[in-house]
Amino acid sequence: MNVRLSIGDFSRMTHLSVKALRHYHQVGLLVPVEIDPVSGYRFYEPEQVPTAQVIRRFRDLGMPLDQIAEVLDAPDVRARNQILAAHLRRMQDQLAVTQATVASLRSLLERPPAPITVEHRSVARVRAITVAGQVAFADLDGWLAAAFGELDSALAAAAVKPAGPQAALYPAELFQFGAAEVVAFRPVAAEIQAAGPASMRDVPPAELAVAVHHGPLADIDQTYGALGSYVAAREIGVDGPIREHYLVTAADTSDESRHVTEVCWPVFQTGSRSLTADDR
């Protein structure tokens, strides 16, 4: 005798809401064994309970429905474990980001910001190998990693050494509207016949107020805040992209506390002096 379970009973047995069960049916993840043609009522069988319980646990782990479907449809244990391992790596990455954010917030709340030193610097036009793209702020980290990978490949293929650190130009629209054309670049002393997304261009000259950020990029907004306050207080800001120079990166050390980034704000007043943000 085939036992049929109403959606309400099945919900109680699996701790999945009726709304969730209806959605899983719509997307083909957990299909009822029978649907009454007149009433439209869904019916399940007891053998589906373990599958539903597995789905609920995967959802508790934040796994997207399409990946759960891949796990359930995996042809063998090896394929299933590969999907699970990839998801666990993503969870570990997310956990690391959460831990870094918590540490940053605790530091922000418990310790007053340290005064920063600001250097006024005039930089000349520089020839560079570049990758440019329209980037959303939320996708910036991944895009930069890919862009610098392209630049490294272009330099290696041309057997040309860079003449400066990894760097990027960030227009005001990126911060104001959440998306803009970002330019990642490496200065070079020789022309490169680059292929793919990389190309040669001139990075324009600029007058800059420069502050050095020590530590992970998750905290770089604190350096931006201090440097922007310094520039605003002196009314020396001008239009133009902000530059970041990546002096010590993950390629040099996995310890993010040792990473070093220059934040360069465009200004009209320059000199060879270095000041703290408290100087007047």
Image: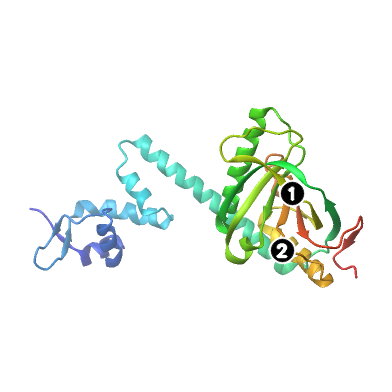
Q: Which image quadrant for residue 147? A: top right
Residue tagged by mark 2? Answer: 107
Q: Residue 279: where, in percent of width, then height?
A: 90, 68
Q: Residue 129: where, in percent of width, then height?
A: 68, 40
- Dot 2 lies on which element? helix
Q: Which quadrant is home to the C terminus?
A: bottom right
- Dot 1 lies on which element? strand
Under mark 1, the amino acid is His
Q: Residue 219: where, in percent of width, then height?
A: 69, 59
Residue at position x 28%, y 51% in the image: 51
Q: Nearer the viewer, residue 216 or 96?
A: 216
Under mark 2, the amino acid is Ser
Residue 40: give its label.
none
Residue tagged by mark 1? Answer: 245
User: Is 72 on the left-hand or right-hand side of 2?
Assistant: right
User: Is 173 on the left-hand or right-hand side of 208?
Assistant: left
